[in-house]
Image: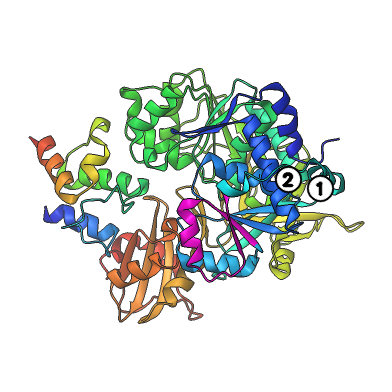
Amino acid sequence: MDTLLAILEDMHSDVDFKICETLIDDGVLDSFDIITLVAEIDSEFDVTIPVEEIIPDNFNSAKALYALIEKLSD
Amino acid sequence: MQNNVLEYLEHTVKRFPDKIAYANEEVGITFREVYDQGRAIGTFLNRRGFYKQPIAIFMPKHPKTIVAFFGVIYGGNFYVPIDEEMPRFRIELILKNLNPKAVICDESTQKVMEAFDYDKEIYLYDSIIKTEIDEYIIQNVRDTAIDTDPIYVVFTSGSTGIPKGVVACHRSVIGYIETLSEILKINENTVFGNQTPLYFDACMKELYPTLKFGATTYIIPKNLFMFPLKLVEFLNKYKINTICWVVSALTIVSFFRVFDSLVPEYLHTVAFASELFPIKQFNIWRKALPNARFINLYGPTETTGVCCYFEVERHFEEDEILPIGKPFKNTEIILLDDNNNIPAEGELGEICIRGTSLTLGYYKEFDETDKVFVQNPLNNLYPELIYRTGDLGKYNERGELVFVSRKDYQIKHMGHRIELGEIEINVNMLEGIKSACCVYDDVKGRILLYYVGDTDKKQIASGLKKTLPRYMIPNHIVQLGTMPLTANAKIDRAFLKKHINAMKKGN
């Protein structure tokens, strides 16, 4: 989780990713961030997120995104 | 002879009054409604004495916003779209430069507008479209209109820290739309899927051919460009067959391998602009849509959107560059070297543009205009303006024009044209900053900010979000102990750019 938070905080250092649960709904992340995130997750966690999983629910919070990474690494 | 863009609408409304012109997922506006609401707005504005005035449109990305543009033109004025997502600071900068006597809002933006430092008229779209149309006013406006009158002002990033307003006229827009429609083979069966924002000139590719041919434009929700599978579902649901997107909107689809799951069924024309299309991504698109036409478009805002095109009809290898091809009708590209001579064959030169596509220049910025709209140095016989783009280009061995790089610090990021100098000026305004430099990481496509000072990344990020639009916020911020300088004591940009990876850790 810390690795993921570090990636996110590097992208938007003014956002508290531990608590924010509306990253998509409130427009915190944009399409550029999604590409960056998916690429970074690929290289840091060796997890490829399939396009079917690139949906708002999985990106609205760091927690949801981490749950997805864990699910995909199994 | 046509001398006003509204003639497109007047011709089409007779043929397809009940067809949907502009739509989103919730509503569609027919050509009849565009025509009636446009004339109502025109009557309203003109009756209040607004004529040949800039009228700001401060509305969300919505079909009504497009109708508001035409309404402004019907009244004999020119429209200035304002990005509703821009921070207040920037909107006030633009309003200060523009000093519009009226702004058109909808319910959602009216409150926001009322909080601004703006004391002129604020009108609500839904109210003013109820105005009874005065045919006499509308006709009178048209009878006195000439084709070099302004049609819009759009604001683009300025290296001095203040956005520049580019003023275009009816003639250059008509010339653009005529040629573009021919190249893209637009007709009444065209269904556009609009991606580009309404506050830039890029959206004209859909808005005006739709008027001219009685086609239909669907506005695609911005969020779908984060979730590409849903995006392709949208294209299929609304049977979109023609798109004119920025390259980064197309690559998000290919990058995530959407085509392995879903292919756009109706898409037959794919035009793209604003950035180099990485061939690896381009080939994924081409393989997925083997029968579609792919057209690379090129042109700065200062020459009315697009003035060069290249239809891709041969295979490109990953180490090749898609050319920008050849100029539109009534446009000439002149390459000029540092001495204002034509460079030798295959050599680099600044791309300069001559012809009808030239806009009128920058709003209230005569000095800035004179720097780039200049006398053609190859012509010493009579006055003839060219626009110096600041883009460097050359001809390849096939005689096709190729974009190579920029002369200055202007970049293209996610399809947006950005002056790095404008970001730096805004960083330098923040408390605690001693010096700042932005560079663009071409490989990862990121804006990097290096700074020296007594403040942290968090303060900078939140500070910048108050003054700059979202797409201009640096993607990565690095604090340095000292700023690398050149022998002339200027910030060493080349060094910073060369050492992007090492500098990331703040070494």
| Residue B80 picture location, percent across and down | 62, 55
Q: Rate crowding at label 2 as few (under 14), some (14 to 19) or many (20 or more) other CA atoms within 10 Å.
A: many
Residue B400 in view here: no
Left/right of residue B181 with respect to residue B408 in the rendered view:
right
Image quadrant where one finds the N terminus of chain B: top right
Residue B104 in the magenta stretch? The answer is yes
Rounded to the nearest whole Å, what is the CA distance between mark 1 and mark 2? 7 Å
> In the rendered image, which quarter is residue B324 located in?
top right
Q: Rate crowding at label 1 as few (under 14), some (14 to 19) or many (20 or more) other CA atoms within 10 Å.
A: many
Left/right of residue B404 with respect to residue B168 in the rendered view:
left
* Up-down relation of residue A16 to residue B492 (above or below): above
* Up-down relation of residue B485 to residue B147 (above or below): below
**Contact? badges 1 and 2 (CB < 8 Å):** yes
Image quadrant where one finds the C terminus of chain B: bottom left
Q: Chain of mark 1?
A: B
> In the rendered image, which quarter is residue B372 located in?
bottom right
Magenta-colored span? B102-125
Spot the residue most to the right. Answer: B381
The residue positioned 61% from the left and 37% from the top of the image is B207
* Up-down relation of residue B485 to residue B341 (above or below): below
Name the N-terminal-most of marks 1 and 2.
2
Left/right of residue B376 with respect to residue B53 in the rendered view:
right
| Residue B354 picture location, percent across and down | 77, 48
Residue type, numbered disc 2: Tyr
Question: Residue B74, which numbered label?
Answer: 2
Query: Who is closer to the viewer here, B195 or A48?
Result: B195
Question: Residue B218, which numbered label?
Answer: none
